[in-house]
């Protein structure tokens, strides 16, 4: 009798994740306060004028695709950050990417300029993310070690957070303060094709930069000295990673606000599935992040309440118990 080939459970889990994403997309398209005939809406097409077609093509599909895109950006950015800093608790917000984008958006909301153009807020938020990363890079200095990058990121992040708190404290009206707070909580409500098309090129460019540095992340897992001996010297590769994170995560924050915990939790979940390989972790985290945020948004749109639940709050509720579980597991491991 021929022996059966052993089943690689890690690869099987990744394939199941890939299969779950289109199923979650279908679930997102049929989720919401109004029931639609999905088959009829698809048959009518993009230019259909029926209510089902309008809801599907103009509201639910761009929102679902944006959730996938932003989740992938956050997951991929978190994996890259943890790989570069060799710290499993690192996330893109550590280097001020989220804070830089958030501060730029808050200033527009503060002065009431965000409504003059639908493109103004996200564009300047992306600029704010790049400015924050540039400040971290200049403060840390060329060829900075991981610890110096973290210190520079913490310093810039604290300064930007202080400026955001100051803007909230002196908000010119309750309406402006409410808009700022809601934006900081993160949301995919009222997002459409304009936001999707704005974020897409930046997130794709960030993905290209991060994947081009995947071998650097692999070498860096052996230590900075080993990475240098393998030819990854100088500041080119760290700069690629920082620019990739700024482009991908900055665009995500620019169109949806700050959504926490995805970049922190997702790499932890899929790291065992890729056998701790930082290069493979990039695309695995992108896949898992897309699925996680899409499922969170399905929960949001099906939540019955006077006001839509903010997706940033949902991801925080998901992330906090996960870290409780990590702490308990670590304590049990030490006890054994």
Image (tube, rainbow, N blue to C red):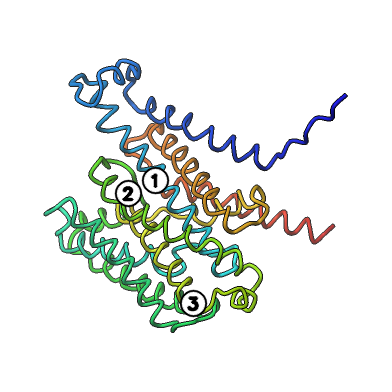
Of 319 and 81, nearer the camera is 81
Disc 2 vs disc 1: Cβ atoms closer than 8 Å? yes
Q: Residue at x 35, y 75 (%)?
A: 134
Q: Look at the picture and state if 34 lies above or below 137.
A: above
Of 281 and 258, nearer the camera is 281
Q: Look at the picture and state if 28 lies above or below 290.
A: above
Sequence order check: which comes first, mark 2 or mark 1? 1
Element type where label 3 sits in the image: helix
Q: Which residue is mark 2?
A: 200
Of 294 and 209, nearer the camera is 209
Q: Is residue 236 left or right of residue 40?
A: right
Counting other residues with Cα less than 10 Å from the Cα at mark 1, is it few (<14), some (14-19), or many (20 or more)? many
Counting other residues with Cα less than 10 Å from the Cα at mark 2, is it few (<14), some (14-19), or many (20 or more)? some
- For residue 24, the mark is none
Tell me the distance, in whole angstroms, between the alpha carbons under discs 1 and 3: 27 Å
At which x and y percent is residue 116?
11, 54
Q: Residue at x 51, y 48 (%)?
A: 317
Q: Residue at x 43, y 68 (%)?
A: 240
Sequence order check: which comes first, mark 1 or mark 3? 1
Sequence order check: which comes first, mark 3 or mark 2? 3
Counting other residues with Cα less than 10 Å from the Cα at mark 3, is it few (<14), some (14-19), or many (20 or more)? many
Q: Which residue is mark 3?
A: 149
The part of the image, by quadrant, that contains residue 39 is: top left
Q: Which residue is mark 1?
A: 69
Count of picture labels: 3
Q: Quadrant of the N terminus?
A: top right
At which x and y percent is residue 307?
32, 39
Most distant residue in the left direction: 116
3 or 2: mark nearer the eye: 2
Tell me the distance, in whole angstroms, between the alpha carbons under discs 2 and 1: 7 Å
Q: Look at the picture and state if 146 lies above or below 303.
A: below
């Amino acid at each position: 009798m021929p022996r059966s080939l052993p089943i690689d459970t890690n690869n099987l889990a990744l394939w199941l994740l890939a299969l779950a994403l289109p199923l979650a997309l279908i679930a997102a398209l049929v989720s919401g306060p109004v029931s639609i005939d999905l088959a009829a809406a698809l048959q009518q097409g993009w230019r259909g004028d029926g209510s089902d077609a309008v809801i599907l093509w103009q509201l639910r599909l761009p929102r679902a695709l944006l959730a996938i895109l932003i989740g992938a950006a956050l997951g991929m950015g978190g994996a890259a950050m943890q790989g570069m800093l060799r710290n499993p608790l690192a996330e893109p917000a550590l280097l001020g990417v989220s804070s830089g984008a958030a501060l730029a958006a808050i200033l527009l909301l503060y002065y009431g300029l965000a409504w003059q153009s639908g493109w103004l807020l996200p564009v300047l938020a992306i600029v704010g993310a790049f400015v924050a990363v540039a400040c971290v890079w200049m403060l840390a200095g060329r060829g900075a070690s991981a610890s110096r990058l973290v210190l520079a990121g913490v310093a810039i992040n604290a300064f930007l957070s202080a400026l955001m708190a100051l803007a909230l404290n002196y908000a010119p009206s309750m309406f402006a303060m409410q808009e700022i707070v809601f934006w900081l909580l993160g949301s995919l409500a009222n997002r459409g094709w304009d936001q999707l098309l704005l974020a897409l090129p930046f997130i794709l460019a960030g993905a290209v930069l991060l994947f081009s540095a995947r071998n650097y992340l692999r070498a860096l897992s052996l230590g900075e000295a080993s990475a240098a001996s393998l030819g990854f010297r100088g500041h080119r590769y760290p700069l690629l990673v920082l620019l990739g994170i700024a482009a991908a995560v900055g665009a995500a924050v620019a169109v949806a606000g700050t959504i926490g915990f995805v970049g922190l939790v997702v790499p932890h979940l899929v790291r065992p599935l890729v056998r701790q390989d930082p290069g493979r972790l990039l695309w695995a985290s992108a896949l898992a992040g897309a699925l996680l945020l899409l499922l969170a948004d399905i929960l949001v749109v099906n939540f019955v309440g006077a006001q839509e639940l903010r997706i940033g709050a949902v991801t925080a509720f998901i992330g906090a118990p996960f870290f409780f579980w990590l702490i308990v597991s670590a304590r049990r491991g030490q006890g054994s």
